[in-house]
Image: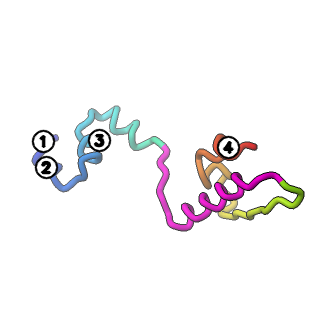
């Protein structure tokens, strides 16, 4: 594609669009984190819980979502970031 036809795209999207077919397809197949205000709020609450010093009665948090989503769908880094 010619650069002149991609001026409407952001620089990162333009760079992706200028790649070859195989690279663009791989880029489209990658997982992405889409930031939603409620998701950010939930992550901040999880971080506060994780940082809470251990005590007899630990605070807790219930997250729920669609049954088809696995817990990793809530936050891809959760298993690595919140392991005690």
Q: Which mark lies nearer to you, 3 or 1?
A: 3
Left or right of 23, for residue 69: right
Q: Earlier in the sequence, mark 2 or mark 3?
A: 2
Q: Mark 3 to mark 1: distance in Å?
A: 13 Å
Q: Quadrant of the N terminus?
A: top left
- Estimate the spatial distance between the alpha carbons at disc 1 and disc 4, rounded to whole Å: 43 Å
Q: CA distance from mark 3 to mark 4?
A: 30 Å
Dot 3 and dot 4 residues touching (CB under 8 Å): no
Q: Nearer the viewer, residue 60 or 35?
A: 60
Q: Secondary structure at mark 4?
A: helix
Q: Along the line of sight, which residue is nearer the eye, 76 or 58? A: 58
Q: CA distance from mark 2 to mark 3?
A: 14 Å
Q: Secondary structure at mark 3?
A: helix
Q: Which corner quadrant holds the C terminus?
A: top right
Q: Which residue is mark 4?
A: 79
Q: Is residue 76 above or below residue 35?
A: above
The spot of residue 77 in percent (x, y) is: 60, 45
Q: Position of residue 48 (x, y in %)?
A: 66, 58
Pick out the residue farthest to the right. 56
- Where 13 sits versus 24, above or below? below
Q: Residues within 10 Å of mark 3 (few under 14, many from 20)?
A: some
Mark with earlier residue (3, 1): 1
Residue on which disc 2 sits: 5
Tag on residue 16?
3
Task: Judge the density around disc 4: few (<14), some (14-19), many (≥20) Cα neighbours within 10 Å.
Answer: few
Q: Quadrant of residue 18?
A: top left
Q: In this picture, which residue range is highlighted in magenta?
A: 31-54
Task: Name the residue that disc number 1 marks.
Answer: 2
The residue located at (15%, 52%) in the rendering is 7
Q: Classify residue 44 as left or right of residue 3.
A: right
> Horizontal and vertical percent for residue 25?
37, 38
Graded by Cα atoms within 10 Å as few (under 14), some (14 to 19) or many (20 or more), the crowding at tag 2 reads few
């Amino acid at each position: 594609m010619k650069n002149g036809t991609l001026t409407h795209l952001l620089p990162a999207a333009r760079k992706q669009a200028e790649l070859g077919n195989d690279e663009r397809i791989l880029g489209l197949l990658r997982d992405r984190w889409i930031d939603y205000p409620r998701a950010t709020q939930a992550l901040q609450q999880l971080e506060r819980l994780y940082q809470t010093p251990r005590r007899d009665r630990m605070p807790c948090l219930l997250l729920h979502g669609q049954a088809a989503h696995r817990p990793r769908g809530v936050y891809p880094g959760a298993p690595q970031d919140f392991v005690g």
